[in-house]
Amino acid sequence: MDLHGRSFLTLKDYTKEEIYYLLDLAKKLKAKKKAGKIGHSLEGMNIALLFEKTSTRTRCAFEVGVLDEGGHATFLTQSQMGKKESIEDTAKVLGRMFDGIEFRGFKQENVEALAKYSGVPVWNGLTDVDHPTQTLADFLTIQEHLDKPLNEIKFVFTGDIRNNVCYGLMYGACKVGMHFVCLGPKSLEMDPEVVAYCQEECKKSGGSLTITDDTDAVDGADVIYTDIWVSMGEDESLYKPRVELLSPFKVTEELMSKTHNDNTLFMHCLPSYHDFFQKLLASRIAGAMVSHLQKVHIFQHSQFQQFLFCFFPDITCQKTKKLLIFYFNHHAIFIYICARSTDRRSNYLQLQFTCIQAVSFLQGSHWNSGLFCCLFQFFPCSRGIFPLGQIQTSQFY
Ligand code: NVA
């Protein structure tokens, strides 16, 4: 199968065979990486990662994926696109410099315009109405964890059933013939065009689509999936009403037991407020993270030191108002905390990310130099005396 030059804007554009082909390719690439083999398929290529919305997993997955295959990724988060420059002009400029563009943003029309005018393949890393790369990753997880073909899977999405992740999963599910259940309040009206499209595709694939507010519909589910209740770009004032509206559809032990299936996989695309509004079961979240995210580590701020100590028992840490300083083997790593954002949670996430980078750096592996990452420096130092030299800073946001 030859998918060269094709954009990946939505799974609606892909056949069942093409979806299976991509899943098999992902398996091969994953096995190759596990075996420590470096890929060369993107050697000499430049890929732009254009982000209007925030991201942790998608951005990292793309960047690491590109680097693992020998390409170079440029992370672009504050472009002129849609501000001083039209999408068409941005697409043309990027298309001349880059061999491919990954886009995360608001409108689906924008990712389509990028594909139309850039002349290079464009991949959708989430829009307001779709998240096809997430769907592929989730299907791969299902294949890896459940001993059933995808067309025999009963998949229940519970919660905000008219969001991008749910629609993306629906497109993929109806193509491969899954039995998909949207479990949520009737007042959250799903897009009739999305529903009609999926129903038509189900007729061809042998799959099914059920939309219900009855939690008994989870009976026999192989997968229970949920997502955050207020998505990026939605107004924060929606938190309270959404919590009230969607609380009956949260994933609890009770809901899980209603599946009458001990092997039901709980999945979440993340991020999630599992310690906050949604109160998802911590153990389930932990389990889901291990199975779903494989090697992605999420740590609480208070656990950073423990995390580093696991890797480097000799490390010591000093914390000042703006600096975290780790001493290790006569070297010091400075992590400068320039907390511009008032959103403590997002600062913590950036800091977690930086610590993970610090560890990879100490281990001698590649570290990301994307613009959004906090820069840190690694200076020689002895007897705990701070080295001279300028500490590089960058912003957390
Ligand atoms: N529905 C969520 C998905 C995040 C990966 C959002 O758009 O914020």
Image: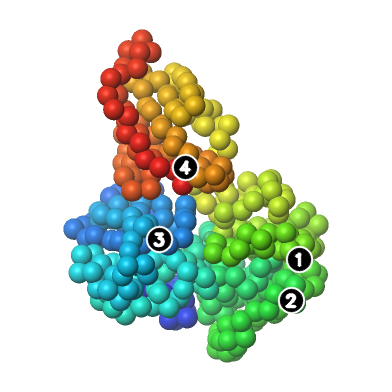
Spatial separation of the CA atoms under disc 2 and disc 4: 38 Å
Name the one closer to the observer, 298 or 295.
Answer: 298
Query: Which of the two marks, 4 or 3, is nearer to us in this view?
Result: 4
Spatial separation of the CA atoms under disc 3 and disc 1: 30 Å
Query: Which of the two marks, 4 or 1, is nearer to us in this view?
Result: 4
Quarter of the render that holds ligand 1: bottom right
Report the residue at 50% width, 45% height from top: 341
Q: Position of residue 127 (x, y in %)?
A: 48, 69
The image shows residue 100, relative to residue 318, as above or below, that is below
Quarter of the figure that contains the N terminus: bottom left
Report the residue at 36% width, 22% height from top: 332
Q: Mark 4 falls on what kind of element?
A: loop
Q: Which mark is residue 315?
A: none
Spatial separation of the CA atoms under disc 4 and disc 1: 33 Å
The image shows residue 359, relative to residue 289, as above or below, that is above
- Answer with mark 4 or mark 1, whichever residue precedes in sequence: 1
Q: Which mark is residue 340?
A: 4
Report the residue at 46% width, 29% height from top: 322
Q: Which mark is residue 51?
A: 3
- According to the image, what is the colour scheme of the structure? rainbow
Report the residue at 42% width, 62% height from top: 52
Give yes or no for contact between labels 1 and 2 (Cβ–Cβ under 8 Å): yes
Which residue has dot 2 on it?
Answer: 187
Residue type at mark 3? Answer: Phe
Spatial separation of the CA atoms under disc 4 and disc 3: 19 Å
Give yes or no for contact between labels 3 and 1 (Cβ–Cβ under 8 Å): no
The image shows residue 124, relative to residue 251, as above or below, that is below
Name the one closer to the observer, 214 or 352.
Answer: 352
Which residue has dot 1 on it?
Answer: 245
Q: Residues within 10 Å of mark 2 (few under 14, many from 20)?
A: few
- Answer with mark 3 or mark 2, whichever residue precedes in sequence: 3
Q: Is residue 100 visible?
A: yes
